[in-house]
Amino acid sequence: MKYKVAPSILSADFTQLGNQIREIEEAGAEYLHFDVMDGMFVPNISFGIPVMKSIRSATGQVMDAHLMVQDPIRYVDAFKEAGADLITVHFEACPDVRACLEKIKEAGIKAGLSICPATPVEVVKEYLDIVDMILVMSVVPGAGGQAFIPESLDRIKEVREMIAQSGREIDIQVDGGIKVSNAKDVLDAGANILVAGSAIFKGDLAKNTKDFLEIMKDYE
Ligand code: DX5
Ligand code: ZN
């Protein structure tokens, strides 16, 4: 299992976006977490296809699209064409979860399924035959800079146990309120991909990225 940090550009300075992406990539961040918010599934609106298209040409990172979007099947092809390597959709936003995951796989990219903090972890079990990643949200989706919900640790453990029983190699990504101070607890619970927005993009981006990678070294 590979351990990765996925900086969320939602917290970036958009007047410096290209420079900041280069900075975290050079510091060793192999994923770029791209938070799409539609103002329907979550109250906030962030960014979408044109932004992904432009940054796709600027980075070799894994473009990790987190679609906080109602009925996301409508956008799978567009985000694939814009350069997504991985598309994560919300269980709570899909009229037909399996159809959406199948559409992502048919597009030839990796499929992630995300659950909000209030959603029982058991709902992911029936999709463990098809997903490449489970995203356990550790904040209520819709904004960066929120506090980590501590109950997430037990949820991560439960998902890791379900994955172990499935016999498949499936990543667990955790997203929301991740800091250097809680990263070890989240990794110990069974996560292997950490999303960090404000913890990376506020202050010294390169140092912040390297601090996470340093913690992850003990897990390789
Ligand atoms: C929240 C997003 C997260 C968020 C993370 O809806 O999915 O990716 O940007 O930001 P921090 O790390 O600041 O909580
Ligand atoms: Zn996210």
Image (cartoon, rainbow, N blue to C red):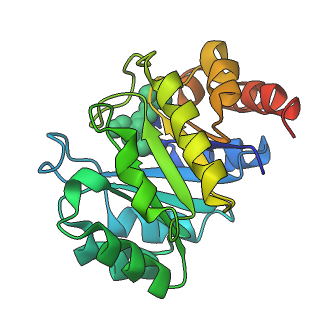
Residue 212: x and y in percent read 73, 28
**Residue 187 vs residue 67, the one in the foreground:** 187
Q: Is residue 102 above or below residue 32?
A: below
Task: Name the residue at 62% across, 26% down.
Answer: 186
Left or right of 151 on screen, residue 178 = right
Q: Quadrant of the C terminus?
A: top right
- Residue 187 falls in image quadrant: top right
Q: Nearer the viewer, residue 152 or 35?
A: 152
Q: Is residue 42 above or below residue 106?
A: above
Question: Residue, x 79% and y 32% (percent of image)?
Answer: 216
The count of marks equals 0
Answer with left or right where residue 129 lies relative to residue 188.
left
Ligand 1, seen in the image, is in the quarter at top left
**Residue 162 visible within the image:** yes
Residue at position x 36%, y 28% in the image: 139
Whether residue 191 is situated above or below residue 17 in the rendered picture: above
